[in-house]
């Protein structure tokens, strides 16, 4: 596992810094997401895509059943970062999530220039 010291990290957005703090405090969230994404692929096929929101709600379910949910919350702000991290660190999960451009490019994951816009088109 990659060791990350936050004080040595390159300049990151506030949201990304909060994500890394959360990730380091709660490694079980990452482990659950990897397990659930692999389970999805095992049942649906190697190219199957799933929304991070679906898996995130399953994590939330597991957390509420098995942990003290007063001190361990599953914050929605971290979902996009986990989607990118899972695909980057687990080649078997490449493409399992569809990701869009972030307002501030994360220090990991795909380059914003290669991703579709996160803007909604309400004209159609």
Image (cartoon, rainbow, N blue to C red):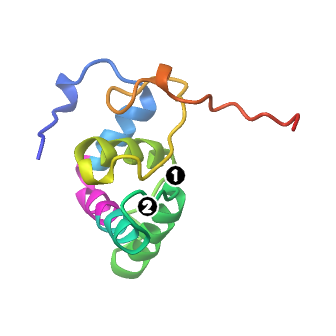
Give coordinates of residue 31: x percent, y percent. 25, 62
Q: Is residue 111 above or below residue 58?
A: above
Magenta range: 24-34
Instruction: Using the numbered discs, state the Cα–Cα distance from disc 2 to disc 1 in whole angstroms.
Output: 9 Å
Identify the mark at residue 41; answer none if there is no mark.
none
Position of the C terminus by quadrant: top right
Q: Is residue 72 above or below residue 84?
A: below
Is 65 on the left or on the right of 31, as rendered?
Answer: right
Residue at the spot x=37%, y=65% of the render?
41
- Nearest the camera: 93 or 36? 93
Picture quadrant of residue 123 = top right
Give coordinates of residue 85: x percent, y percent. 32, 43
* Residue ID for mark 2: 73
> Can residue 88 be found in the magenta stretch?
no
* Residue ID for mark 1: 76
Q: Is residue 104 above or below residue 100?
A: above
What predominant SS class does the magenta segment belong to?
helix
Q: Is residue 21 above or below residue 27?
A: above
Is 74 on the left or on the right of 3, as rendered?
Answer: right
């Amino acid at each position: 596992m990659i060791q990350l010291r936050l004080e040595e990290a390159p300049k990151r957005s506030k949201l990304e810094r909060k994500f890394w703090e959360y990730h380091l405090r709660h490694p079980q969230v990452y482990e659950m997401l990897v397990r659930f994404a692999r389970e999805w692929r095992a049942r649906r096929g190697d190219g199957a895509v799933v929304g991070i929101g679906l898996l995130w709600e399953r994590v939330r379910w597991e957390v509420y059943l098995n942990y003290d949910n007063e001190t361990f919350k599953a914050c929605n702000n971290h979902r996009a970062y986990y989607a990118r991290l899972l695909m980057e660190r687990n080649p078997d999960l490449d493409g399992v999530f569809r990701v869009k451009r972030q307002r501030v490019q994360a220090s990991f994951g795909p380059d914003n220039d290669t991703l579709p816009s996160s803007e909604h088109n309400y004209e159609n």
